[in-house]
Amino acid sequence: MASTRMTSGGEIGAWEMFLYRFSKWLRSPRPYLMVLGFVLFFGAWFLLSEVFKVWRFASLPGPRQVLHEWFSRNPVYGMSLYTPDYYMHIGMSVRRVLYAFVISTCLGVPFGLFLGWSKNFRDFTFPVFETLRPIPVLAWVPLAIVMFRADETPVIFLTTLASFYATALNTMLGVQSIDESYPRAAACLGASRWQIFRHVIVPGALPFIFTGLQISVGVAWFSLVAAEMVSGEYGLGYLINSSYVNVQYQVIIIGMISVGIVGYASSALVRLAGDYLMQWRVRELALGAGR
Amino acid sequence: MNAPDLVAASPSAQHAAKGAIRIQNVDKRYYAREGQVQAVSDCTLDIRAGEICMIVGPSGCGKTTLLNAIAGFHDITGGAIYLDGQMLCGPGKPKAEPGPDRVVVFQNGALFPWKTNLENVAFGPVVQGRLRKKQAAEKARGMMADAGLAGVEHNYPGEISSGMRRRVEIVRALMNDPKVLLLDEPFRALDSLTKSVMHEALLEIYYKNKVTTFFITHDLEEAIFLGHRVVIMTTRPCRPKLILEVDIPHPRNYSVLTSPRFRELMEETVNAVHEEAVKAFEAGEKEM
C-alpha cells in the first residue's frame, strides 16, 4: 500500500516520552539560553544596584544582599530559607491558591462549556460575565471583606474571581473552536445530544481548557498577592506588604522571587496534568506524524 | 477479492433493496451576505439501492448542500427526500434527523483525534447502545483487519497517514450497517497516488458490503472509475444536468482507466462538466 504505516511497537509510556523529550531538550540550545537569560537578568540587576549604583536603582537592595539574607542561617530580618516562618508564608499562599484554583476550575470549566455549547445560555449570561470581568480584583476588596467575615474566605474569594474568568472564557473559546464536523459525525453515528457533549465537546475543548487553566493559575497568584496585601494574615503577599511597612527591602524581594518560583512550578504542574490527559496531542506533536 | 457473483452494472437487481434514496423536487434557499442564495432548485434524483452514485459538479455548485440535507445537517426549503419510501424531510418536516442509517464521511475527515482508531470505529454501536464496549471493540478489530488496518488500532488518528485515516473513517461508518454511505469528496486532500490506492480500497470494501454510496466529487475520472452512475450537476442552483450509466462491469481495478470504453465515457461527459465549471468560475462562486 502506498501509505506508510506507523510503527506501533507497543504503547509509548508517559515516562519514556518524558525521558525522550528531556534528552532532546538537553541537546537543544534551549536550556543554555535559559541559563543565559537568568545570568543577564541578575547581572544587570547586580551592576545597576550594587556596582554602578545607578540613579533610582541605588536605593534597591542588590542581588548579593538579597541572596545573603535569603541563604543566611541567622537573617537580619528574620526571614530566610532557614526560618520556619518563611515556609509558613509559602504554605499559606499555596493553600489559598490551591483552594481558589480548585473552586475556579470546578465552576469555570462547566460554566465555560455551557457558554460555548448553548446559545441561549450564552445569550443571557455572557453580557453579565463580560461586564464583571474587567472589574479589577482590588475593586472587590471592600465587598469581599463585607460579604465574608472570616479571615480566609475573602482572600480565597478574591483569588478565585480572576481565575474563574480566565478558565471560563478559554473553555468557551475551546468549545467554539471545535470543527463542526465532529459533532455532526457523532450525530451521524447515533450519539445523543448528551453523548456528543461528553465525547466530543469536552475532549475537543480540552486543549483550550488547559491553556485557560495555565493562565488561571498565574492569575490566581497575582490576585492572591494583591488580596493578601490588603486583608489576611500570613502569606507571601502579606509578607511583602508588611516588609514594606517595616522597611525590610531584602525581604520584599525574597517574597517576590518566591512568588515567581512557586508560580512557575504551579503552572508547570498544570501543563503536566494537561499532557497526561491529552496523550493524543502529545503523541501527535512528538512524532510529528500525520498532516 | 474474488466476488464475481456480486458483479453487476445494476446492483439493485441482485441485492437487498435497502438504501434507495428518492430526492424529489428539492429546493434550498438561504440567506448569505450576498443576499438570497438558491443552492438547490427543483432537484429530482433517484438513487438505487446498493449502487455507487457519483455526484459530479464544480466546487460550490450546491452538491454538498444536497448531502447535508440527506444527512440531516441542514433543512430544505421545498420538496422531499425519502429513504426506502420513508420521508426523511419534506413538507412539515424541513430537517431530517441525523442517524446511523446515513453515515457521512467528511471532506476533511472527522475522526475524533482524542480517541484511538479503535475507539473511533467502535463509537457508533456503543453510543447507540447496540453493543457493549467490549463486543464493539471486537467487531471493530475484525472490520479494521478486513480493511487492512490491523496494527493501527491503538494509535491515534494523528499518528497515521491521511490515506489510512480515510480508511478508518469509512470503516467507522460501516460499523453501523448504514443503509447509505454519504461521502463528501473524501479523497480530495490526498495526493494522487494515495488516492488511487484509496479508490481500490473503497471498491474492495464496497464489494463486501454493497451499501448504497452517495459520493460527491469534482473529479470526473474518479467518478467514472468508481460509479455505477455518474450524475453531473448544474452549478447553482444544483440539479442533475446529465446522468451517465457507466457500463464498465464491476469489479473494476485501475486497468479500467486505460480501456477504450473509459475514454469514450470521459469524452461523452467532459464537455458537460467543463461547461458547468466555466459557469461556476464566471459566477465567482466561492467554495462552500
Image (cartoon, rainbow, N blue to C red):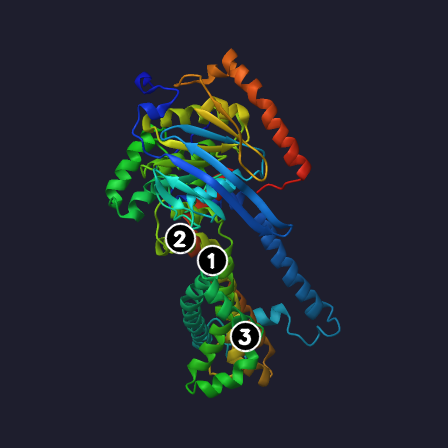
Give how far across and how far down residue A119 sits, in percent: 48, 62
Which chain's residue wears label 1? A
- Disc on res. A132: 3
Look at the numbered discs 1 and 2 and tell me whether their residues touch, using CB distance below 8 Å: yes
Which chain's residue wears label 2? A
Q: In the image, is residue A263 above or below residue B18?
A: below
Give how far across and how far down residue A98 sits, in percent: 42, 69
Q: Is residue A29 visible?
A: no
Give how far across and how far down residue A61 sits, in percent: 64, 74
* Same chain? Circles 1 and 3: yes
Which of discs 2 and 3 lies nearer the camera? The answer is: 3
Which of discs 1 and 3 lies nearer the camera? The answer is: 3
Which chain's residue wears label 3? A
Compare marks 1 and 3 and give the one earlier in the sequence. 3
Kind of residue at badge 2? Leu
- Disc on res. A210: 1
* Same chain? Circles 2 and 3: yes
Residue pointed to by mark 2: A277
Quarter containing the N terminus of chain B: top left
Look at 38% across and 22% down and name the residue there.
B10
Kind of residue at badge 1? Phe
- Tag 1 secondary structure: helix
Quarter containing the C terminus of chain B: top right
Give the number of marks: 3
- Tag 2 secondary structure: helix
Look at 58% across and 80% down and name the residue there.
A248
Kind of residue at badge 3? Leu
- Disc on res. B148: none
* Same chain? Circles 1 and 2: yes
Gap in Å between the C-alphas at discs 2 and 3? 31 Å
